[in-house]
Image (spheres, rainbow, N blue to C red):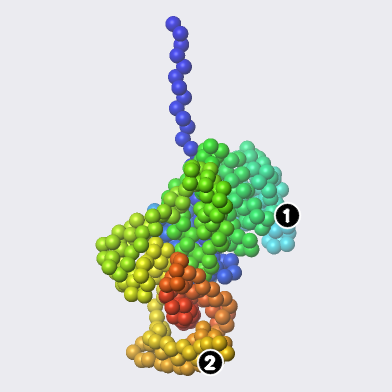
């Protein structure tokens, strides 16, 4: 009788956890600061996106950071929420207090392990660093069951010492050990070799998640992260759009779509709903007041655009000739349905749902009212317009001042004049001012009305949401006052009105922060 060989069942893809640090490492980069409402809107979207852990901030660093970590911990329910902490008891205590309301809290503590950091920053011996690691991981574990330990500047650390520290951290109770490329120094080959070494040399390496946190100083953060995944890492730390200190971090959308597109190479899966990627990216760019670079990987306007005749012919014949992923995969809809003033609430809310948005009835009512206002100004409202309505609503603030009216007189070889009328509580205030163009005149008039010291306009940008002369104009301004920076947004078919609304939005935020 001939023996029969039974077919081997295919193995399941290895699960890679996504640790998002947009609200901590990303938000602390210059020009990327967010207020509490903005952080909460991003946190909710990250939860919808399906990340495994949201690093909400650095609780001990300021009362504002403590408040934001606490608010996010009390809001997010379907993923872990982490707070960063140095390896000192007061940081761990602050993180613990801020995370009390979280369904799945995580304390993320760190200490540097490279010779240059230990000598010049910590002024501690390797033996003292090892002792502190054990002591503080144990202390954090007594406060929270989920503890992540990071060896800062790990990629410039002595390998044997790094393995010793990570072994001690796991033995003391760390559930995740993180290997940061803090200054973006290594290459993919070096990081893969380091991870392979550590997986073998670290005692108990199979008892904890192995994580990577790569910076992009040499443009290799995503490549390094993916190389580390192939070598055995089980968690990756990313930010949306790659924002972060200096040149930024590994971009979440690029790492996730690389793992999804190249399953043949990585044989890995994440819990990310990739159809939420575009929406998440747009929200973060909008909140920090930056436009999406046209050539940005995955989410840029040119990512699925083809102008070359050869490329166009190829894509029309067979999409895979020049596209390795589909626009639908990241949440871009191909059917750009056009709504107009005769469209009803059902059609509008149905389109919101098709675009992946879900809101409470009160919010949907606000969106619909704004939609009808815009319908009176332009013939057709596109998906891009609807997304702009939603995104600008997300970052609106309670009004100290509101725009009631404005009149502009401007022309070639004519000094611009603007009269602005603002509402403030139950009264109206009005001012007139000259300027070098209508926007400058409007801003000068507002400056004479609002109760703020002299403000400096650091940046002004305007983008259209769609094609055509009646396109909505999205204006973003960055306004600095008394050392504080506020990002303002405005949306209108009238670019002067959009400019005024953006400036007032920033002014209201500055007044809130006072």
**Helix, strand or loop at disc 1?**
helix
Position in image of residue 503 (x %, y %)? 48, 80
In front: 218, or 54? 218
| In contact (CB < 8 Å): disc 1 and disc 2 | no
> Dot 2 corresponds to which residue?
434
Q: Is residue 487 left or right of residue 116?
A: left
When asked about the image quadrant of residue 373, the answer is: bottom left
When asked about the image quadrant of residue 498, the answer is: bottom left
For the question of whether residue 127 can be seen, the reply is: no
Residue at point 56%, 80% (across, down)? 457
Report the disc number at residue 378. none
Residue at point 68%, 61% (across, down)? 122
Position in image of residue 307 (x %, y %)? 55, 55
**Helix, strand or loop at disc 2?**
strand
In front: 168, or 421? 421
Position in image of residue 363 (x %, y %)? 32, 68
For the question of whether residue 199 can be seen, the reply is: yes
Residue at point 40%, 80% (across, down)? 399
> Dot 1 corresponds to which residue?
115
Residue at point 58%, 54% (across, down)? 250
* Crowd class of label 1 (few under 14; some 14 to 19; many from 20; radius 10 Å): some
Q: How far apart are marks 1 and 2 (CA)?
A: 59 Å
In the displayed structure, 417 sits above or below 468; it is below
């Amino acid at each position: 009788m001939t023996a029969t060989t039974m077919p081997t069942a295919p193995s399941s893809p290895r699960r890679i956890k996504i640790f998002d640090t947009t609200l901590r490492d990303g938000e602390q980069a210059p020009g990327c600061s967010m207020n509490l409402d903005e952080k909460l809107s991003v946190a909710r979207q990250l939860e919808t996106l399906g990340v495994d852990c949201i690093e909400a901030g650095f609780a001990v660093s300021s009362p504002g950071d403590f408040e934001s970590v606490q608010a996010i911990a009390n809001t997010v329910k379907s993923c872990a929420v982490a707070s960063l902490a140095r390896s000192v008891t007061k940081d761990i205590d602050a993180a613990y207090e801020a995370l009390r309301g979280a369904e799945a809290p995580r304390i993320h503590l760190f200490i540097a392990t490279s010779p240059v950091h230990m000598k010049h920053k910590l002024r501690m011996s390797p033996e003292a660093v090892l002792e502190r690691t054990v002591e503080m991981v144990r202390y954090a574990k007594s406060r929270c069951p989920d503890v992540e330990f990071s060896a800062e500047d790990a990629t410039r650390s002595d390998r044997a010492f790094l393995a010793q520290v990570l072994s001690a951290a796991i033995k003391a109770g760390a559930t995740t050990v993180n290997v940061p490329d803090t200054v973006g120094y290594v290459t993919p080959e070096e990081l893969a070799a380091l991870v392979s070494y550590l997986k073998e040399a670290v005692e108990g390496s199979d008892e904890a998640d192995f994580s990577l946190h790569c910076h992009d100083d040499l443009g290799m953060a995503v490549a390094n992260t993916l190389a580390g995944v192939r070598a055995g890492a089980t968690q990756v730390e990313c930010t949306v759009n790659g924002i972060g200190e200096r040149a930024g971090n590994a971009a979440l959308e690029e790492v996730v779509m690389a793992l999804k597109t190249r399953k043949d190479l990585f044989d890995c899966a994440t819990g990310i709903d990739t159809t939420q990627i575009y929406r998440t990216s747009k929200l973060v760019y909008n909140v920090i007041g930056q436009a999406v670079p046209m050539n940005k990987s995955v989410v840029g306007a040119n990512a699925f655009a083809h102008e070359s005749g050869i490329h166009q012919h190829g894509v029309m014949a067979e999409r895979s000739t020049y596209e390795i992923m589909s626009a639908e995969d990241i949440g871009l809809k191909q059917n750009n349905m056009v709504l107009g003033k005769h469209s009803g609430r059902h059609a509008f809310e149905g389109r919101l749902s098709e675009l992946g948005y879900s809101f409470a009835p009160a919010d949907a009512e606000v969106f619909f009212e704004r939609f009808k206002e815009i319908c009176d100004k332009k013939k057709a409202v596109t998906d891009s317009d609807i997304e702009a309505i939603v995104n600008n609503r997300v970052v609106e603030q309670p009004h100290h001042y509101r725009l009631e009216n404005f009149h502009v007189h401007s022309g070639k070889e004519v000094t611009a004049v603007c009269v602005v009328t603002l509402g403030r509580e139950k009264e109206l205030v009005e001012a007139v001012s000259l300027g070098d163009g209508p926007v400058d005149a409007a801003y000068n008039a507002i400056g004479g009305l609002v109760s703020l010291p002299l403000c400096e306009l650091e940046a002004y940008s305007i983008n259209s949401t769609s094609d055509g002369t009646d396109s909505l104009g999205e204006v973003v301004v960055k306004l600095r006052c008394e050392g504080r920076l506020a990002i303002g947004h405005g949306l209108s078919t009238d670019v002067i009105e959009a400019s005024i609304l953006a400036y007032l939005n920033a002014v209201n935020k500055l007044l809130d922060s006072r």
